Amino acid sequence: MVIFEHIINKGKWISAVILLLVPGLFSGCGKAGNESAGISNERISITEEELDIEGVNKEFSLFFVADSHISLCDDRDAVLKDKAKFRSTLFKHDGIEAWDSLELLFEDTINKDDDLVVMGGDIVDSAMYASIDRVKAQTDKLKRPFIYYMGNHDFEYGTEYFTDKAYSDYLPRFKDLRGDKPFQVKEYEDFTVFAMDDMDCQIGKEALAAYKAVDAKDKPIILALHSPILPVKDQEDLRNKCDKLYGPGSVYKKHLLMGSEGCRPNEVTKEFLKLVLAKDSPVVLVLAGHLHFYHKDMLNSSIPQIITGPAFMGEALRIRIKHGN
């Protein structure tokens, strides 16, 4: 099955075309090149999309993965061993450990020679050294540019969840993966990839200032978030999926989605959402994770949003960016 959606922008960027290839129905879709830890490469599922951007001169492939929730612990974080052991069972899928699923996905992106790998938050379940070391060993094998930014779990530590101590003591453990900024930017000739850390469904002032600078360049932006944005209209499908997985009224009760009817935005986040959803916004695609299911919708009349399924279930996205008409 092939689904085309034609998106007409009223701004500078005339059109974007998203092509959804349903995993398993096309040769090569959902297949990896090698095996990891004796696990069949058929245990992963890559959803492939095509994004046409006017003016792009060279085809570009972006691999997006989120929510592997790796929970490995050793004596360096002995206080968390029991919690880590329990949490690891939650993200073991069909007998495959979360870290093995991520390794299979990384093998796929290496074999397909993607140009950029974007890790969209909750790659690790807590800021434990063993988990971070495992991811660092895997990113060292990529041999290509990558972006790593924070979800709502990466730098939590026991009861330290978005606390001052979490920021001062545990976020720095990720410096080799993400640097020391709450945003990541990869600017190419024809478009920019902008990613920002999650702050419990909010945006920080430093990240907003950086986004404004990129927005002002009037170049197409692929925006990578952890928490998705609640669409302006046609919310029912996404709401129903959230309610089915997280309980009735979950969009209002839990920190799942950014937006006025989701996790109530602070003033900084309101300003950010206003820029992103503006009629003349240069955003051509929003990528997100967090919800642990695949979903694709329109945030408004011109901006598509794709939410990836979780890496601990062997799911990821590949976005093939091509020249638009």
Image (spheres, helix red, strand yellow):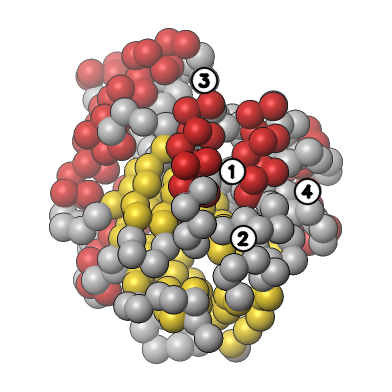
Say which quadrant the N terminus sits in.
bottom right
**Mark 4 and mark 3 residues within 8 Å of each other at the beta carbon:** no
Residue bearing mark 1: 227
Which one is in front in this view, the residue at disc 3 or the one at disc 1?
1
Sequence-wise, the earlier of marks 4 and 3 is 3
Q: Nearer the viewer, residue 108 or 212?
A: 212
| Amino acid type at image mark 1 | Ser
Q: Secondary structure at mark 4?
A: helix
Residue bearing mark 3: 161
Which one is in front in this view, the residue at disc 2 or the one at disc 4?
2
| Amino acid type at image mark 2 | Gln
Q: Secondary structure at mark 1?
A: loop
Q: Residue furthest top?
A: 165
Sequence-wise, the earlier of marks 2 and 1 is 1
Question: How would you rate the neighbour count of disc 2 (Cα within 10 Å): few for under 14, some for 14-19, many for 20 or more?
Answer: many
Sequence-wise, the earlier of marks 2 and 4 is 4
The alpha-carbon separation of the residues under discs 2 and 1 comes to 11 Å
Q: Nearer the viewer, residue 304 or 32?
A: 304
Please indicate, yes or no, whether residue 205 appears anywhere in the rendered image.
yes
